Image (tube, grey):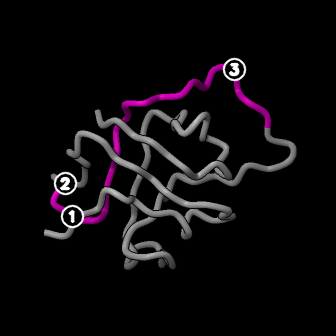
Amino acid sequence: MTNCTCTVTECKHNDDHCCCKSEILVNTDSKNDCSCGCTCCASFDQKTSDSFKNSTQTPNPALKIGCNAVQCIHNENHLCQAESVAINGMNTQSGNHTECATFQAR
């Protein structure tokens, strides 16, 4: 499990800069046509006006992070092994405009 912080407040899974999912997937530009760089959060779901907080979802600071960025030094068998990960993105309506700020090229 990896500690994760997330600045993507437009995602319905974000609660106080923490993801409420048990696992997320980081994709690469070649896999998901990410427009902000080489990585993006494929688990992004747009928060809508009719979205409400699910009482069964709680912030999960340590979660499983699947990763298709095989060129990242933290990727081991498509799982992130970094101690902590930051997912960034501001004012976005698409996961394509998010990024894994922890990515480091091999």
- Frontmost of labels 2 and 3 is 2
Residue 103 to residue 7: above or below: below
- The quarter of the picture where residue 53 lies is top right
Q: Is 37 covered by the magenta stretch?
A: no
For label 2, the crowd category at 10 Å Cα-Cα, with few meaning under 14, some 14 to 19 and many 20 or more, is many
Q: Are marks 2 and 1 in contact (CB under 8 Å)?
A: yes
Determine which residue is flagged by label 2: 74
Residue segment shown in magenta? 52-74
Image spot of residue 93 (x, y percent): 69, 64
Residue that mark 3 sits on: 55
CA separation in Å, label 2 and label 3: 33 Å
Query: What secondary structure is marked by label 2?
Result: loop
Name the residue beneath numbered marker 1: 72
Query: Within the magenta stretch, is there residue 59?
Result: yes
For the residue marked with disc 1, what is the amino acid?
Cys
Q: Horizontally, is 98 left or right of 29 in the view?
A: right
Q: Amino acid at mark 2?
A: His
Q: Secondary structure at mark 1?
A: loop
Q: Is residue 104 above or below residue 13?
A: below
Q: Disc 3 marks which amino acid?
A: Ser
- Residue drawn 39% across the image and 57% down it: 26
